[in-house]
Image (cartoon, grey):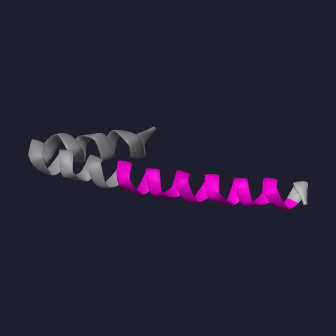
Amino acid sequence: MRKVFVFNKGLVIKPKKCAQAFLKSIIKSLRKASGNFLKIKNNVFIANIQ
């Protein structure tokens, strides 16, 4: 809980533009990670069928 509070506090202190860029980079990395996860899932699924 404390870590989250500190994290949010840091975001609030930063300028809005900075925070937006930061959030965008997080979303980008999350999309990348979920994309890789889906790829792996699909590969495993195909492997199971064969």
Horizontal relation, residue 34 to residue 13: left or right: right
- Residue positioned 63% across, 52% down in the render: 38
Q: Position of residue 9 (x, y in %)?
A: 24, 41
Q: Is residue 10 above or below residue 33?
A: above
For the image shown, how many numbered marks are present on the structure?
0
Image quadrant holding the C terminus, namely bottom right
Q: Is residue 36 above or below residue 15?
A: below
Magenta-highlighted residues? 27-47
Residue 23 lies, in percent from the top left, at: 28, 47
Main SS of residues in magenta: helix
Residue 36 figure quarter: bottom right
Q: Is residue 29 left or right of residue 24?
A: right
Q: Is residue 2 or residue 25 the one in the foreground? A: 25
Q: Check if residue 16 falls in the magenta segment.
A: no
On screen, residue 43 versus residue 17, left or right, reads right
Q: Position of residue 19 (x, y in %)?
A: 19, 46
In magenta stretch: residue 35: yes
Left or right side of 39 for 43: right
Q: Position of residue 27 (x, y in %)?
A: 37, 48
Residue 12 placement: quadrant:
top left
State the residue at coordinates (45%, 51%): 30
Q: Nearer the viewer, residue 46 or 37?
A: 46
| Residue drawn at (11%, 42%) of the image | 16
Q: Quadrant of residue 39?
A: bottom right
The residue under the point 89% across, 54% down is 49
